[in-house]
Image (spheres, grey):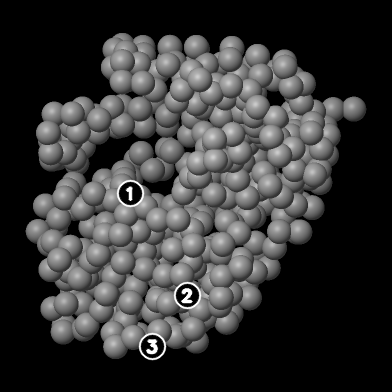
């Protein structure tokens, strides 16, 4: 079988060709590695350099597609009337060239966030969309209470950063509209939570929905199981990113509540987070709330932090199936997460984690004061089954074989 993947993530291209690694979106790389021996694999991704060229390495044919609209000048052009649509019209022929060159039996598109899914209306080769997050709900719930797009842009800290945030919001708005078109035009979907299945079914009543769980990064399968922390005070870990809906304001508020009650703790926040906007929004500084911003980190460092923490905290206002929650569960670190989106499909409350209402810092703080160590064994057992590589591989390839044209 010839499988062509489309992804915004370059997977192992730069590691294989240049020897440079990448911290983000490891589950795409993990799935690719898992199915390399199941046929001929092509992998198409956005490239930021004209110098990136076709490469056949490690059993994968890589097809970089340079996107001139991602450079500074190109992004400015996109802000002009019709600019975002022009980008899509430019890219679709490049994707079709890759399809014609590789001649796949089936096309797998990772995520509805970018323009790859638009090829479904341009080819008769079966296309299946692997749902990641969903842009529409994220765009509608992008800002927490008290925040707004105007505040977010004006509080960026300089003209260049303000323009960057304005661009991101315009880009997100277009992506949400494009996603609606993609969901309505593709017939086959890989989903994994009750929420994403419901969202797909609403957008496309004739959709064929298959259940397929995600492969996690290898460092989390091999990590030592969690053990209760032996430190003098609880240590909490969170992995999020910059968008306001990820809940940095909830972290600050919960940290301030715990501090006001005289509850000692350390709270490590990993990921690409700039706290300035959230500190101004809440009137609480990271220092006052006991928060340490650790920045992006390799999987080994995060796995080690999870093994040594008291609990993992996930405060997002909206999410589908955050891998950070799954990574904590497979290690066995007790998880406290928002009851939102697809997260309840990952957590059986009181058995494999704890849930709190969206944005409720008081409820989160109360849960953080509890001893949740009894959750560890059950959540680890559940996660090991959910993310079993052999089961995922068999399920994934079975679905793709069912789509192949005779």
Q: CA distance from mark 2 to mark 1?
A: 21 Å
Q: What residue did someone put label 1 on?
A: 272
Q: CA distance from mark 3 to mark 1?
A: 29 Å
Dividing the picture into quadrants, the one containing residue 60 is top right
Left or right of residue 62, residue 358 in this image = left
Q: Nearer the viewer, residue 37 or 355?
A: 37
Q: Nearer the viewer, residue 96 or 225?
A: 225
Q: Residue at x 42, y 37 (%)?
A: 136
Looking at the image, is 379 positioned above or below residue 284?
below
Q: CA distance from mark 3 to mark 2?
A: 11 Å
Give the label on residue 230, or none. 3
Are the residues tagged 3 and 1 within 8 Å (C-beta)? no
Expressed as whole percent of the image width and height from the top left, the position of residue 23 reads 46, 49
Q: What residue did someone put label 2 on?
A: 307
Q: Residue furthest right?
A: 406
Looking at the image, is 126 positioned above or below residue 303?
above
Element type where label 3 sits in the image: loop
Could you tell me if residue 351 is visible in this image? Answer: no
For label 2, count other residues whose C-alpha is less than 10 Å away and answer few (under 14), some (14-19) or many (20+): many
Looking at the image, is 328 positioned above or below residue 181?
below
Could you tell me if residue 103 is visible in this image? Answer: yes
Left or right of residue 138, residue 185 in this image = right
Left or right of residue 347, residue 41 in this image = right
Q: Residue at x 50, y 45 (%)?
A: 21
Are the residues tagged 2 and 1 within 8 Å (C-beta)? no
Marks 3 and 1, the one that precedes in the sequence? 3
Quadrant of the snapshot with the N terminus: top right
Expressed as whole percent of the image width and height from the top left, the position of residue 63 reads 62, 25
């Amino acid at each position: 079988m010839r499988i062509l993947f489309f992804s915004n993530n370059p997977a192992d291209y730069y590691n294989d060709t240049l020897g440079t690694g990448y911290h983000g979106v490891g589950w795409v790389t993990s799935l690719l590695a898992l199915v390399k021996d199941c046929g001929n694999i092509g992998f198409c991704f956005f490239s930021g350099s004209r110098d990136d060229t076709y490469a056949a390495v490690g059993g994968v044919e890589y097809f970089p597609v340079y996107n001139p609209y991602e450079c500074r000048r190109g992004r400015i052009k996109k802000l002009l009337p019709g600019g975002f649509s022009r980008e899509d019209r430019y890219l679709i022929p490049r994707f079709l060239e890759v399809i014609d060159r590789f001649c796949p039996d089936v096309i797998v598109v990772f995520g509805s966030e970018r323009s790859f899914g638009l090829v479904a209306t341009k080819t008769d080769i079966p296309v299946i969309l692997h749902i990641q997050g969903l842009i529409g709900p994220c765009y509608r719930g992008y800002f927490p209470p008290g925040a707004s797009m105007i505040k977010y842009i004006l509080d960026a800290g300089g003209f260049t950063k303000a323009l960057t945030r304005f661009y991101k919001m315009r880009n997100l708005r277009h992506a949400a509209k494009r996603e609606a078109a993609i969901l309505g035009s593709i017939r086959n979907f890989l989903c994994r939570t009750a929420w994403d299945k419901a969202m797909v079914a609403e957008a496309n009543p004739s959709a064929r929905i298959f259940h397929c769980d995600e492969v996690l990064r290898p460092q989390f399968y091999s990590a030592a199981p969690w053990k209760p922390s032996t430190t003098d005070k609880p240590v909490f870990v969170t992995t999020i990113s910059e968008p306001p809906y990820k809940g940095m304001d909830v972290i600050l508020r919960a940290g301030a509540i715990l501090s006001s009650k005289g509850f000692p703790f350390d709270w490590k926040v990993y990921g690409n987070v700039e706290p300035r906007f959230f500190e101004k929004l809440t009137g609480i500084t990271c220092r006052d709330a006991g928060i340490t911003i650790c920045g992006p980190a390799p999987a080994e460092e995060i796995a080690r932090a999870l093994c040594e923490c008291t609990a993992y905290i996930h405060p997002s206002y909206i999410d589908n199936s955050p891998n950070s929650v799954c990574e904590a569960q497979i290690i066995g670190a007790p998880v406290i997460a928002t009851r939102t989106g697809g997260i309840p499909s990952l957590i059986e409350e009181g058995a494999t984690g704890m849930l709190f209402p969206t944005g409720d810092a008081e409820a989160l703080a109360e849960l953080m004061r509890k001893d949740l160590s009894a959750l560890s064994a059950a959540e680890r057992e559940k996660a090991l089954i959910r993310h079993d590589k052999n089961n995922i591989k068999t399920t994934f390839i079975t679905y793709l074989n069912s789509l192949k044209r005779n």
